[in-house]
Image: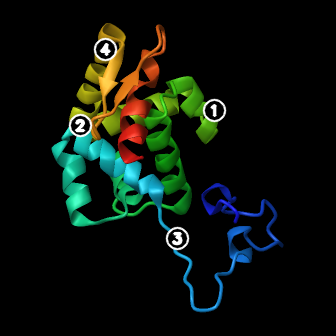
Amino acid sequence: KPNLQNSSKNSGHKDLPSVRSLFRPNDGEKLYSIDYQQQEIRMLAVLSQDKNLLDLVNQGVDMHTVMGMKMFKKDIITKEERDVTKAINFGMIYGLGISAIAFKIGQPFDYAENMVSEFYLNFPDVKLWMDETTEKARIDGSLTLFTGRIWDCLPGMAYQAVNAAIQGSCA
């Protein structure tokens, strides 16, 4: 059986169907699609205990859209702006620096730096939690995940602590 989690969302060509649309369940069975990526943003809210982010979780909104509205300081954002917001959100979770985020969103360093600053202005306890988590991993050499599992941090790899805490807790 194929692992559908690792199937591309898009075919990569505008005239071809999405790869996922080619999968069909057997008669009498159902195929569900779950957005695990929003799960990581929700876990970030739980771990950081950022009030503003927790409020969004409790409202049940599309996290990337509403976060984008805050970061862009607009009541309505375009699909492209949502995509930028999503890339920034996950870039931060995955431990990307400003330069890597700028490259990922195809914008200059100053633009990416400003957007990340807007994120932290809107969700200040996330920054505090990220800094504390990274420092704890650097000093202790490990983290205890939300699930109680221990994540061992190799020397010089503390920058991975935020990603390990979020993804390891979601797993």
Distance CA(mark 3)–CA(mark 1):
29 Å
Q: Which residue is mark 2?
A: 48
Indicate whether 119 appears above or below 37.
above
Q: Which residue is mark 4?
A: 135
Q: Which residue is mark 1?
A: 103
Query: Residue 107 in the image: x percent, y percent?
Result: 60, 36
Identify which amino acid the numbered label 2 is placed on: Ser
Secondary structure category for the residue under label 4: helix
**Residue holding disc 3:** 33
* Residue 119 in sight: yes
Examine the image and state in which quarter residue 76 appears: bottom left
Give the CA distance from mark 2 to mark 3: 27 Å
Mark 1 or mark 3, which is nearer the start of the sequence? 3
Instruction: Tell which of 42 and 122 is nearer to you.
Output: 42
* Dot 2 alpha-carbon crowd within 10 angstroms: few under 14, some 14 to 19, many 20 or more: many
**What is the CA distance from the residue labelled 4 to the residue labelled 3?**
36 Å
Residue 108 in view: no
Is tag 1's residue or tag 4's residue first in the polypeptide sequence?
A: 1
Q: Amino acid at mark 4?
A: Glu
